[in-house]
Image (cartoon, helix red, strand yellow):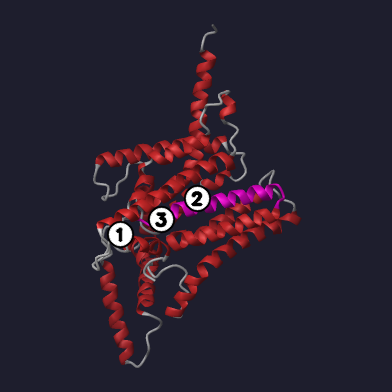
């Protein structure tokens, strides 16, 4: 249970290419990167579709009377194609390569479900919500950090249901709840084999992996900086402590609970929570430091050693977020449009507890490209319309 299973399964076919018996060769790594690039291309297609088909912004080609004017989806796709963070998520061997298309597809299904509910097409809406849950379950098996998303989605749907113009009739509210329960059912259907396997191995319910404790301690411990800058070396001390305790229990005639991996995870998690409770002010300040490390336009991460890459990332990120603000305002009345903002809120809160890094904002930035494309199209169309109005008559 050291890793979630989906990304290793995704990589496993490529390890068979030119296998030497001593690990993957350069060729197999290149094939894996090529598969990641294909997943990145799928992200672009999904972003274009979501922008054009789901948001249905009132600002489109007809608004500037040019049949050749690119749609908002074109600008969304272009921003995602040029964004250095999205490029990195595709070409490096990182689980984000499959995580990003999965969450984009899941959010798209939720958006379709919301629109179907708006039109009282409840069976269609429930189908989309079930499919969205299944895709979210797959996303959790790629990156366990997505496992708390259902709580955020529930809050979003609860607010959406009570907004003016939404379906607020008491007789229909339970149908919204059925949609959310079907979303949870989709997650259960996909993740239950992993849960059953983990229970068989440990005798405990392990929803994602047994690295949660280590990840939490990486963010909450004496001397923590907000980044994972200690190479997890602190785990060795906890391993030694756990082995000493296990030996003591065996000598006393007691059988240690569950597996060593489970006990080590519990020890790390308890140590992190205890430190945060005893040092609540430091934990809060550290959360703000992590927020800055994750969302600062100019990355402060040591792994980005090139100033050129750091500035390109800053420019691309700032452009997308600026256009997204305009897109949010343009689409403020579009049902379900604010759904594409929620991953930014989710990851911002999550990584105030765990470690902060520019890496962890990239999936959310890719999602918000949907709104950024609308904002970019709005700005360009406004500039063109101004130019036409100021042009002197012939």
Q: Identify the magenta region.
A: 94-121
Labels 3 & 1 near each other (Cβ < 8 A): no
- For the residue pair 60 and 31, the one nearer the viewer reads as 31
- Horizontally, is 173 left or right of 336 in the view? right
Q: Which label was assigned to residue 204? A: none
Q: Nearer the viewer, mark 2 or mark 3?
A: 2
Q: CA distance from mark 2 to mark 3?
A: 20 Å
The secondary structure type at the circle numbered 3 is loop
Q: Which residue is mark 1?
A: 224
Residue 385 percent coordinates (x, y): 53, 21
User: What residue is shown with label 3?
Assistant: 351
Q: Residue at x 35, y 42 (%)?
A: 84
Q: Residue at x 49, y 61 (%)?
A: 138
Q: What is the C-alpha distance between the residues marked 1 and 2?
A: 33 Å
Instruction: Tell me if label 2 and label 3 are in contact, CB under 8 Å.
Output: no
Where residue 342 appears, x then y in whole percent?
51, 49
- Secondary structure at numbered mark 1: loop
Judged by depth in the image, the label closer to the viewer, 1 or 2, is 2
In the foreground, 310 or 281: 310
Residue at image location 58% in from the left, 58% down from the top: 131
Q: Earlier in the sequence, mark 2 or mark 3?
A: 2
Among the 4 quarters of the image, the one containing residue 154: bottom right
Q: Is residue 362 left or right of residue 107?
A: left
The residue at the far front in this view is 18
Q: Residue furthest bottom?
A: 253
Task: Say few, some or many: other residues with alpha carbon within 10 Å of mark 3 (under 14 / 14 to 19 / 20 or more).
Answer: many
The quadrant of the image that shows the C terminus is top right
Q: Quadrant of residue 322?
A: top left
Which residue is painted at 36% across and 69% down in the image?
2
Q: Nearer the viewer, residue 134 or 349?
A: 134
Is 340 covered by the magenta stretch?
no
Above or below residue 259? Residue 213 is above
């Amino acid at each position: 249970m050291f890793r979630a299973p989906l990304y290793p399964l995704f990589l496993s076919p490529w390890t068979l290419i030119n296998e030497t018996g001593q690990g993957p060769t350069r060729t197999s790594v290149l094939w894996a990167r090529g598969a990641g690039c294909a997943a990145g291309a799928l992200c672009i297609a999904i972003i274009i579709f979501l922008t054009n088909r789901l948001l249905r912004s009132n600002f489109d080609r007809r608004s500037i009377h040019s049949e050749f004017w690119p749609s908002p989806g074109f600008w969304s796709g272009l921003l995602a194609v040029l964004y250095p963070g999205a490029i990195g998520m595709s070409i490096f061997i990182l689980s984000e390569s499959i995580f990003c298309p999965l969450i984009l597809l899941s959010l798209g299904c939720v958006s379709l479900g919301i629109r179907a509910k708006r039109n009282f097409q409840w069976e269609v809406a429930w189908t989309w919500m079930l499919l969205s849950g299944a895709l979210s379950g797959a996303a959790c098996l790629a990156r366990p950090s997505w496992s708390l998303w259902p709580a955020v989605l529930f809050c979003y749907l609860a607010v959406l249901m009570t907004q003016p113009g939404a379906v607020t009739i008491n007789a229909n509210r339970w149908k919204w709840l059925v949609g959310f329960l079907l979303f949870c059912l989709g997650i259960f259907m996909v993740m239950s084999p992993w849960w059953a396997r983990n229970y068989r191995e440990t005798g405990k319910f392990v929803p994602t992996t047994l690295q949660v404790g280590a990840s939490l301690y990486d963010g909450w411990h004496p001397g923590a900086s907000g980044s994972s800058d200690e190479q997890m070396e602190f785990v060795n001390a906890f391993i030694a402590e756990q082995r000493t305790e296990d030996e003591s229990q065996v000598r006393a005639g007691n059988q240690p609970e569950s597996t060593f991996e489970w006990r080590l995870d519990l020890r790390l998690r308890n140590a992190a929570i205890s430190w945060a409770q005893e040092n609540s002010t430091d934990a809060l300040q550290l959360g703000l430091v992590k927020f800055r490390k994750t969302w600062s336009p100019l990355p402060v991460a040591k792994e980005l050693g090139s100033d050129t890459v750091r500035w390109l990332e800053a420019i691309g990120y700032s452009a997308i977020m600026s256009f997204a603000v305009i897109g949010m305002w343009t689409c403020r009345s579009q049902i379900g449009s604010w759904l594409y903002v929620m991953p930014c809120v989710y990851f911002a809160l999550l990584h105030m507890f765990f470690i902060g890094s520019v890496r962890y904002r990239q999936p959310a930035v890719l999602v918000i490209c949907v709104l950024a494309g609308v904002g970019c199209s709005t700005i360009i169309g406004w500039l063109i319309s101004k130019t036409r109005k100021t042009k002197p008559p012939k």
